[in-house]
Image: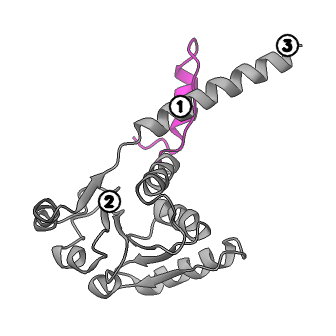
Amino acid sequence: VEYGNISSVCSEIIQASRMFAYKGNDLTVDTTWLFLIEKFRELSGMKILIYGAGNIVCKLALNLVECGCNVIILSRTLSKTKKIIDSLNSIKNQGALSSIAASDDPELSSVAVDAIIGCTNTEPLITKTMIEKMSSDGVVIDIGKGTIFQDGIDFCNNEGIEAWRLDITATINSLVSASTSTSGSYHNVCNV
């Protein structure tokens, strides 16, 4: 059964315990963005390739472009993706000098990128050839479901290239801490 808004269903069932609502896609975006900051320290001027064109990709692309990254969104349906890219470029902070571009050519798009991020729920899409073409100190990140071909993973392992499957645990812990703090502040102010 698809509930759509699962938090409303949970709030009907959970009566005695406190409940924190969250958006899983936003946790994934925040985790990826924080990982890239930790990895590279400064994102301005970086070139990031993201495979996919869904909700997570759009949110992540906006975060990255507003940090000065040039972002390429790689998709098999270029006409649809171009409409999405046009929308993202029109709503990004207009002070941002970097941009978001669309592509349907995995190998050409991979040349000299600093990171390749797989964000699809289908089959593997990131190839060994794509990884070979990225920057020598680049990183491969799987935030979808099994987005890297096995020969790509083997190539990363053999060549000492970082390939990551990100964990959102730290971001969830941060959300729970912030929610608890906000709840405490709210109740203290309201009870005065």
* In this view, the mark in front (3 or 1): 3
Q: Which residues are magenta?
A: 1-24
> Which three-letter amino acid code belongs to the residue tagged 3?
Asn
> Which three-letter amino acid code belongs to the residue tagged 1?
Val
Q: Residues within 10 Å of mark 2 (few under 14, many from 20)?
A: many
Is the magenta region chiefly helix, strand or loop?
A: loop
Describe residue 83's horizontal placement relative to residue 139 as left or right.
Answer: right
Q: Alpha-carbon distance for marks 3 and 1?
A: 29 Å
Let me know if residue 6 is in the magenta part. yes
Residue at the right extreme? 192
Place of residue 6 in the rendered image (x, y in percent of width and height, measured from the top left): 51, 37
**Residue 9 image label:** 1
Residue located at (43% from left, 44% from top):
2
Q: Are marks 2 and 3 in contact (CB under 8 Å)?
A: no
Classify the position of the C terminus by image quarter: top right
Q: Residue under label 2, please give it.
A: 141
Classify the position of the N terminus by image quarter: top left
Place of residue 121 in the rendered image (x, y in percent of width and height, measured from the top left): 31, 59
Place of residue 61 in the rendered image (x, y in percent of width and height, measured from the top left): 52, 68
Residue located at (47% from left, 80% from top):
81
Labels 2 and 3: the sequence-earlier one: 2
Residue located at (16% from left, 67% from top):
152
* In this view, the mark in front (2 or 1): 2
Q: Alpha-carbon distance for marks 2 and 1?
A: 33 Å
Labels 3 and 1: the sequence-earlier one: 1
Residue located at (44% from left, 36% from top):
170
Labels 2 and 1: the sequence-earlier one: 1
Q: Residue under label 3, please give it.
A: 191
Give the SS element for disc 1.
helix
Let me know if residue 12 is in the magenta part. yes
